[in-house]
């Protein structure tokens, strides 16, 4: 399946529905996450198409050449961080699920105690 913005958005919603986390109030965050994932895929393609170098030569005004971190790679790093943050916000990370399960277990124990 092609990674279009709409396909990514639908996939996020489907994943949220599968874990019982979907709600229309999350649409802005879902759209932002979808855009970040879409931009991430474009940046990865551009990075690979331009040689995939972590550092590049940068010539400053006086003619000196410095090695700098590839700006495309810096964008990729930022997008990864954003994707993780938004995914966590939407409950789409394994740690979020573990926290939910831990809360469920604590709630079950509390109900057992109250029944005694």
Image: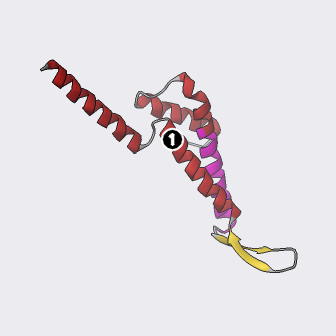
Number of marks in the image?
1
The residue nearer to you, when weighing 110 against 93, is 110
Taking the view exactly as shown, the residue that stands out farthest to the bottom is 64
Q: Main secondary structure of the magenta part?
A: helix
Which residue of the protein is positioned furthest toward the left in this rendering? 116
Identify the residue at horizontal 29%, vertical 30% (top origin): 104
**Magenta-span inclusion, residue 46:** yes
Q: Please state which of residues 107 and 20 is positioned toward the viewer in this rendering.
A: 107
Quick check: 11 left or right of 69?
left
Left/right of residue 86 with respect to residue 68 in the rendered view:
left
Figure check: 95 above or below 60:
above
| Quarter placement of the C terminus | top left
Q: In this view, which residue lies farthest toward the top? A: 115
Residue drawn at point x = 39 percent, y = 44 percent: 95
Picture coordinates of residue 82, whole percent (x, y):
58, 47
Q: In the image, residue 100 lies at what x, y percent?
A: 35, 34
Quarter of the image with the N terminus in it: top right
- Quadrant of residue 77 within the rendered picture: bottom right
- x and y percentages locating residue 114 in the rendered image: 18, 20
What x and y, as percent, mark residue 96?
Answer: 40, 40
Q: Residues within 10 Å of mark 1 (few under 14, many from 20)?
A: some
Residue occupying the point 56% across, 46% down: 83
- Magenta residues span 33-51
Q: Is residue 84 above or below residue 32?
A: below
Q: Quadrant of residue 37?
A: top right
Side of 104 relative to 14 (left or right) = left
Residue carrying label 1: 87
Q: Could you say whether the residue bearing mark 1 is in a helix, strand or loop?
A: helix
Q: Quadrant of residue 71?
A: bottom right
């Amino acid at each position: 399946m092609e990674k279009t913005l709409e396909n990514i958005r639908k996939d996020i919603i489907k994943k949220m529905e599968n874990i019982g986390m979907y709600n229309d109030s999350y649409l802005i965050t879902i759209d932002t996450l979808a855009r970040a994932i879409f931009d991430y895929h474009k940046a990865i393609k551009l990075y690979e198409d331009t040689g995939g170098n972590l550092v590049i030569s940068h010539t400053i005004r006086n003619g000196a050449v410095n090695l700098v971190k590839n700006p495309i790679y810096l964008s990729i790093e930022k997008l990864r961080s954003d994707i993780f943050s938004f995914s966590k916000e939407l409950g789409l990370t394994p740690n979020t699920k573990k926290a939910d399960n831990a809360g469920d277990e604590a709630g079950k124990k509390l109900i057992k105690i109250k029944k005694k």
